[in-house]
Image: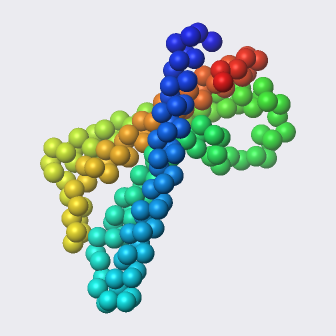
């Protein structure tokens, strides 16, 4: 593979790795927020109205920022009925073919995410709840996570094509 492709794969994998490692630790503040809410409600009789939304936002950030890392370490779920019986080269060809559809889907999703984020910023969109948080921060994080998954999918495509040709980009 050409050197620019190797550099692309190396840098995208590095960014996806570090963002994914960061996202892994979001589970702890999310758990702390939920614990705080439970303690306040059960022991003090004081329900906190912002906790469910905040935990949903954090969970969205958790799985979208971690998506590229999951793709990188091959942790996504797949049907393994025939796939496991294929040779590594045949698997790479199958993956290279199917990742094209994933790339298309993520490109459409990214475009919609950019549009939705622009709307949230332009019109100061707030959620329709009692807490009424602004929506642009989570939409921006979600769009960034989708963008990282798109970049990682392209990196995976390059790695699959190299493996199908009997070479390695690692």
Colour pattern of the rendering = rainbow
Q: Residue at x 15, y 44 (%)?
A: 122
- How many marks the image carries: the answer is 0
Q: Residue at x 58, y 9 (%)?
A: 2
| Image quadrant where one finds the C terminus | top right
**148 relative position to 87: left or right:** left
Q: Is residue 45 above or below residue 129?
A: below
> In this view of the protein, can residue 161 be seen by the observer?
no
Q: Residue at x 51, y 44 (%)?
A: 20
Q: Is residue 45 above or below residue 23?
A: below
Q: Among all residues in the image, which is located at the extreme left?
A: 123
| Image quadrant where one finds the N terminus | top right
> In this view of the protein, can residue 157 be seen by the observer?
yes
Residue 112: % across, % down: 34, 40
Q: Say which quarter of the image contains residue 69.
A: top right
Residue 68: % across, % down: 52, 40
Q: Among all residues in the image, which is located at the extreme top?
A: 2
Q: Residue at x 62, y 46 (%)?
A: 76
Residue 70: % across, % down: 58, 44
**80 relative position to 126: left or right:** right
Q: Say which quarter of the image contains residue 109.
A: top left
In the depicted view, which residue is nearer to us: 18 or 138? 18
**76 relative position to 81: left or right:** left
Residue 45: % across, % down: 31, 90
């Amino acid at each position: 593979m050409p050197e620019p492709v190797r550099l692309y794969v190396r840098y995208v994998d590095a960014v996806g790795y570090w963002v994914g490692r960061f996202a892994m630790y979001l589970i702890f503040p999310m758990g702390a927020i939920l614990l705080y809410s439970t303690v306040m409600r059960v022991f003090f009789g004081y329900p906190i109205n912002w906790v469910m939304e905040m935990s949903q936002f954090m969970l969205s950030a958790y799985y979208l920022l971690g998506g590229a890392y999951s793709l990188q370490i091959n942790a996504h779920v797949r049907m393994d009925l025939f796939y496991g019986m294929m040779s590594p080269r045949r698997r790479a060809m199958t993956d290279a073919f199917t990742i094209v559809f994933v790339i298309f889907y993520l490109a459409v999703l990214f475009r919609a995410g950019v549009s939705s984020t622009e709307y949230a910023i332009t019109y100061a969109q707030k959620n329709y709840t009692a807490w009424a948080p602004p929506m642009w921060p989570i939409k921006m994080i979600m769009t960034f996570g989708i963008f990282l998954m798109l970049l990682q999918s392209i990196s995976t495509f390059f790695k699959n094509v190299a493996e199908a040709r009997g070479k390695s980009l690692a």
